[in-house]
Image (cartoon, rainbow, N blue to C red):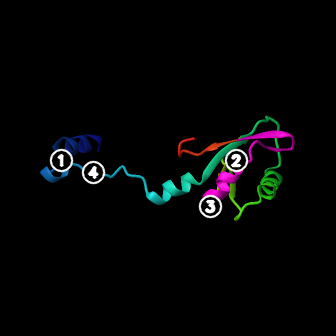
Amino acid sequence: MEDDLVNKWKKFSLTAEESEGVTIPARKNEGIREIESLCLVGRLLSKRPYNFEAFRNTMIGAWRLTKKPDIKKVGEQLILVQFFHRIDKQRVMDGSPWSFDKQLLILKEYDGDT
């Protein structure tokens, strides 16, 4: 069976059209760019564990935004905050530094790779 596959593979060839290849556009979706522009990534400057739900609720209350942001844990130490209005995101950035349970919250712009 193995020899049969090897022989078939040796006879394999592409047509002229198949040899041209396929072009896939490298452009990012505008909707994704807009979402990324409304996000911040952050972490608490602490190695000790914390209650994520308490953190989330405390930050939402402290920030007093137009619409509640979506706050997700994206790693052991990282959080992702998605805002729904630029003004809300700017309010949080302008109001920093923020803290939770006496631990500093570090926030920065999300660039899609962070």
For residue 39, side relative to residue 101 (left or right): left
Residue at 81% of width from left, 58% of height from top? 61
Badge 4 marks a residue whose secondary structure is: loop
Q: Could you tell me residue 102's position as x and y percent?
A: 86, 40
Q: Label 1, on which residue? A: 19
Residue 94, labelled with which disc? Answer: 2
Q: Label 4, on which residue? A: 23
Q: Label 3, on which residue? A: 85
Q: Is residue 93 magenta?
A: yes
Badge 3 marks a residue whose secondary structure is: loop
Q: Could you tell me residue 7's position as x and y percent?
A: 20, 42
Task: Say whether marks 4 and 1 touch (CB < 8 Å).
Answer: no
How far apart marks 4 and 1 lie (CA) works out to 12 Å
Q: Could you tell me residue 30's position as x and y percent?
A: 45, 58
Q: Earlier in the sequence, mark 4 or mark 3?
A: 4
For residue 108, side relative to residue 35 (left or right): right
Residue at 68% of width from left, 47% of height from top? 93
Q: Earlier in the sequence, mark 2 or mark 1?
A: 1
How far apart marks 2 and 3 lie (CA) works out to 14 Å
Q: Nearer the viewer, residue 39 or 94?
A: 94
Name the front one of labels 4 and 1: 4
Name the front one of labels 4 and 3: 3
What's the amino acid at mark 2?
Asp
**Residue with the most extreme bottom position:** 67
How far apart marks 2 and 1 lie (CA) works out to 55 Å
Q: Nearer the viewer, residue 25 or 3?
A: 25
Residue at 55% of width from left, 52% of height from top? 37
What's the amino acid at mark 1?
Ser
Name the front one of labels 4 and 2: 2
Q: Which residues are magenta?
A: 85-106
